Amino acid sequence: MGDLTLDGKVAIITGSSRGIGEGLAVEFARRGAKVVVTYTSESSSAKADNVLSRLADYKYGRSAIKVQADLRTLEGPSQAVAATLKAFPDDGITILVNNAGCEVQKRLSEATAEDLQYVYDLNVRGTMLMTQAVLPHLRRPGRIINIGSVGARAGFPGYSLYSSSKAAMEGFTRCWAAELGVDGHTVNCVNPGPVDTDMIYQINPTIVEAQKKSTPVEQRLATVDDIAQICAFLAEERSRSFKTTNRNLTVLLERRTQTRVERNHRRLSEMTPEGEHAVKNFKRKRSDHDVESD
Ligand SMILES: NC(=O)c1ccc[n+]([C@@H]2O[C@H](COP(=O)([O-])OP(=O)(O)OC[C@H]3O[C@@H](n4cnc5c(N)ncnc54)[C@H](OP(=O)(O)O)[C@@H]3O)[C@@H](O)[C@H]2O)c1
């Protein structure tokens, strides 16, 4: 059965009916977590059942649940959390992986406001609302893991909506690490390159091939297990040192922007979707982006 390094911890993994999320669900269950599998499409109900059956051999695998919730809606995140608390009333929530995500491939000349909303409502607003919904129940040492993308720091033609949404997730990560770190929680962002899932087959193959060629080791697509191993480590108690690194850098970044964000600046626990939009629209000068890799 292996080391139960997540023994009995409740872990919500959004978008875990397939792809990276499915790999996370399996690895977290293997390490002893009580896993919540979320998905949105009716057609993925059977896939979520299949994930649950893959978990059944592990210590708490049979107690894992699936929750259908559209995280693009305002209600979806609280529905997912309510179902979690109902299934595990005495355990709180220790781990949240904001993994559910989507992309739209359109150049600036073609992209519409609806396209922006489609991507941002899930990747950005959904991540914030999901984390807010978990916050009152977050059990120390809490672990928030945001699944970003190498696109957050790259310039791929046709991917500005996706890439900018993932850059927003990095910004969330730094600020939340500063806010929640004082309570003993960590917040990290994992930025995968191309991973062998359904999503990769929607990406322009030229970009995927270029990414593979620029990967020094083995020049291949990542597997979901490559990502799962990193995320599972970040979910464990022994990843605590990541908090120190993140907090120092995050506090620095926050200090540099705080005075200029002024009235728009709110703590995560107080923020409304309108406030989040206001902060996102705040134009930072280039110097504010200088604090880079955590
Ligand atoms: N694959 C890559 O190459 C790659 C690279 C870098 C980063 N990432 C990031 O990794 C994450 C997972 O990617 P993936 O490749 O595993 O994606 P995927 O195979 O397309 O799976 C997406 C998952 O998200 C769920 N989802 C989609 N829309 C949702 C919504 N509105 N509400 C709740 N759940 C929703 C899906 O549920 P249904 O099954 O119900 O649709 C599914 O479980 C994403 O954030 C993605 O941006 C992926």
Image (spheres, helix red, strand yellow):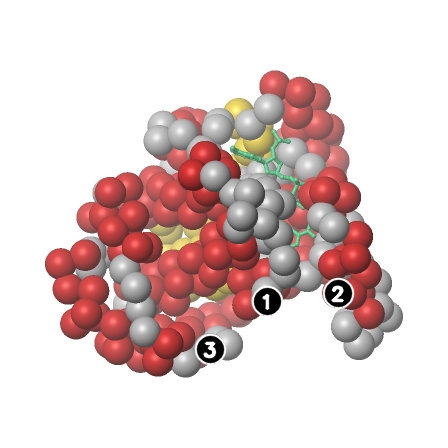
Q: Is residue 63 left or right of residue 284?
A: right
| Residue that lies at the very extreme toward the top in this rendered image | 42
The answer to the question of whether label 1 and label 3 lie on touching residues, with beta carbons closer than 8 A, is no
Mark 1 vs mark 3, foreground winner is: 1
Q: Is mark 1 within 8 Å of ligand 1?
A: no
Q: Earlier in the sequence, mark 3 or mark 2?
A: 2
Q: Alpha-carbon neighbours of circle 1 within 10 Å: few (<14), some, or many (≥20)?
A: few
Tag 1 secondary structure = loop
- Which amino acid, by three-letter code, is at mark 1? Ala
Crowd rating for badge 2 (residues with CA inside 10 Å; few <14, some 14–19, many 20+): some
Q: Mark 3–mark 2 contact, CB under 8 Å?
A: no
Q: Is mark 2 within 8 Å of ligand 1?
A: no
Residue 211: which disc?
A: 2
Q: Earlier in the sequence, mark 1 or mark 3?
A: 1
Q: Tell me the CA gap for discs 3 and 2.
A: 21 Å
Q: Which residue is mark 1?
A: 154
Q: Is residue 52 above or below residue 14?
A: above
For mark 2, give the secondary structure.
helix
> Quick check: can you spot residue 294?
yes
Q: Earlier in the sequence, mark 1 or mark 2?
A: 1
CA gap between label 1 and label 3 equals 13 Å
Give 90 or 280, whichever is nearer the viewer: 280
Looking at the image, residue 127 lies above or below residue 75: below
Residue most extreme to the right: 218
Instruction: State how many labels appear.
Output: 3
Residue in front for this viewpoint, 178 or 90 = 178
- Residue that sits furthest to the left in the current view: 263
Q: Amino acid at mark 3?
A: Glu
Q: Quadrant of residue 50?
A: top right
Q: How far across and how far down the image is residue 231, in percent?
A: 60, 58
Which residue carries the number 3 mark? 292
108 up-or-down from 262: above or below:
above
